[in-house]
Image (cartoon, rainbow, N blue to C red):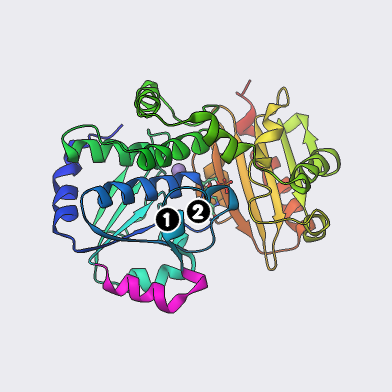
Amino acid sequence: MIDLSKYTKELSKLFSSAENILIISHINPDGDSVGAQLALYHYFKANGKNVSLMAPNNLQEFLKWMDGAEQINIFIKDRKKNKLLIERADLIVMLDFNQSGRLGEAEDSVTASNAKKVVIDHHLDPENFADLIISDPAKCSTSELVHELICEINGAKFMNRSYAEALYVGIITDTGNFEHGSYSSRTFRIVADLLDSGIIKEKIINLIYNNFSSDRIRLQGFALNQRMVVIPEFRTAYIYLSKNDLKEYNHVKGDTEGFVNMPLSIKGINFSALFIEKDNFIKLSFRSKGQFPSNEFASLYFSGGGHMNASGGEFNDTLDNTIAYFLKVLKENVWRFENQS
Ligand code: 5GP
Ligand code: MN
């Protein structure tokens, strides 16, 4: 865990001297990046700051109800407006990512900007792409880290309803509702504060987890029934979905979220992969239990990265060839599984 006080002086100075702040979440923004983004937004708003929000591409449906989500400008929807926001900003805060590539099509404009840049994140080994990088992989979520930084800067706990809801979304989505990830007793103390502040956790859980279309649930059934392969000797299982499969179930963005976690509930399975066929490449998600470094696997073989137990990457080939390559490199890494129980 990092010592936050090392950063708060500089961060506080950057926050107070900024006139136009732009907060950016990562491509395919998840609950944590949007949660952290909106929490920081509500903090700045409460302090009378001029603040704008941007995401490289669209938010998933299940995040759109959050207070402030409607203020998030989508770069690929209106490049001109978003480039202007980037140019106008004198402080850019980037949340929940450790490589500038996660800015998607906004990367060049953000990198070229003269604004001071801050990264707040919890992924390992951040690239050096900002003036100030605050990275703590011991935090369960960027939202948790943002909250702790805000409380340090504020000199007291900060809380309001919209802020608390955003923080709660960030924490539950990055821990799979407290099933995985590096949550700690500190996380639960924060959650206790959020509950004390009056958030209605049943409402949020319903909006985040019980908000699926029937097509999505049927796709999940199909994926488990027809598209899951279990390889007990490698303690591995994977699911693959072609473009046609997705079309058949009227797939919309976000429908396959969480699928990669499902094979891990099989006894003896420590590593799970999900292959999704996109227009020109295959998107991969990885999850592991225990000490199998899925992020090393992702970065070595699939130009990706992430956390030890949750990572992802890409491969530029057909679905069949990607699976064949995955099986080949999996075999080469079988020694990593030997001490796993
Ligand atoms: P998910 O499987 O939920 O899309 O991603 C899980 C984690 O893996 C995320 O926290 C994200 O940081 C990381 N990740 C997913 N895809 C990529 C990728 O293509 N490149 C990198 N560097 N990280 C990824
Ligand atoms: Mn995160």
Q: Is mark 2 within 8 Å of ligand 2?
A: no
Residue 25 horizontal/vertical position (percent)? 42, 55
Q: Residue at x 68, y 68 (%)?
A: 280
Q: Is residue 253 visible?
A: yes
Say what amino acid the circle numbered 2 marks: Pro
Q: Residue at x 18, y 60 (%)?
A: 18
Residue found at the far right of this picture: 226
Q: Residue at x 41, y 60 (%)?
A: 71
Say what amino acid the circle numbered 1 marks: Ser
| Left or right of 83, for residue 206 | right
Foreground residue, 82 or 321? 82
Q: Residues within 10 Å of mark 1 (few under 14, many from 20)?
A: many
Asked if the stretch drawn in magenta spans residue 325, the answer is no
Which quadrant is home to the N terminus?
top left
Position of 1 relative to 219 (above/below): above
Residue for badge 1: 25
Q: CA distance from mark 1 to mark 2?
A: 6 Å
Q: How many marks do you count on the picture?
A: 2
Residue 172 horizontal/vertical position (percent)? 50, 34
| Left or right of 300, for residue 43 | left
Residue found at the far bottom of this picture: 80
Residue for badge 2: 29
SS for dot 1:
loop
SS for dot 2:
loop
Which quadrant is home to the C terminus?
top right
The residue range painted magenta reads 75-89
Residue 68 horizontal/vertical position (percent)? 41, 53
Disc 1 vs disc 2: Cβ atoms closer than 8 Å?
yes
Asked if the stretch drawn in magenta spans residue 85, the answer is yes
